[in-house]
Amino acid sequence: MSRQEANAAFARTSFLYGANAPFIEDLYGRYEGDPKTVDSEWREFFDSLRDGREAVARFARGPSWRNPDWPQLPHDELTAALDADWREVERGLGDKLKAKAQAGAPN
């Protein structure tokens, strides 16, 4: 590819940069659902990609090697103090209080 061809390719795709990625992904998702929901110029652009629906769906699901339960998020008091999500800690505390109450209850 010559330098002029590379510059022309860049000019045609210069709108594809990181900050626009969520916007373009949303447009592409709408296009895949129903091409009529996006502007005709975007429809032409997406048509030119010639991506198969199956390949796009597979890409959207993420890599095939991805571990479905990753990342494992800690549910301890330190993490709760940092992210202010005390639900898991409160559940555990409630269970502890019930166990203590039952153990200390007179027979």
Image: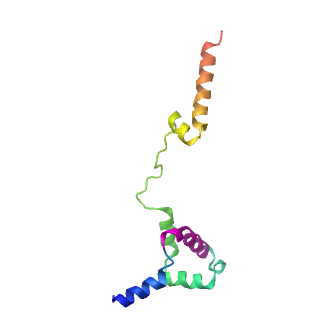
Q: Residue lying farthest left?
A: 2
Main SS of residues in magenta: helix
Q: Quadrant of residue 95?
A: top right
Q: How many marks?
A: 0
Residue 4 is situated, as x and y percent measured from the top left of the image, at 37, 90
**Quarter of the figure with residue 39:** bottom right
The percent coordinates of residue 62 (x first, y second) are 47, 62
Q: Is residue 24 left or right of residue 4?
A: right
Kindly identify the residue that appears in the image at 55 percent across and 67 percent down.
Answer: 22
Task: State yes or no: residue 19 in magenta.
Answer: yes
Residues 70 and 22: in front is 22
Q: Position of residue 80 (x, y in %)?
A: 55, 38
Highlighted range, magenta = 17-32
Vertical placement of residue 25 versus 64, above or below? below
What coloring was used for the rendering? rainbow
Q: Is residue 96 rendered magenta in the image?
A: no
Kindly identify the residue that appears in the image at 54 percent across and 80 percent down. 46
Which quadrant is the N terminus positioned in?
Answer: bottom left
Describe residue 97's horizontal placement relative to residue 10 as left or right: right
Above or below, comparing residue 73 to residue 45 in the picture: above
Q: What residue is shown at x 50% (from left), y 71% (from top)?
A: 56
Instruction: List x then y, in percent, for residue 78.
Output: 50, 35
Task: Identify whether 49 is placed above or below 77.
Answer: below
The C terminus is located in which quarter? top right
Q: What residue do we see at 53% from left, 71% from top?
A: 20
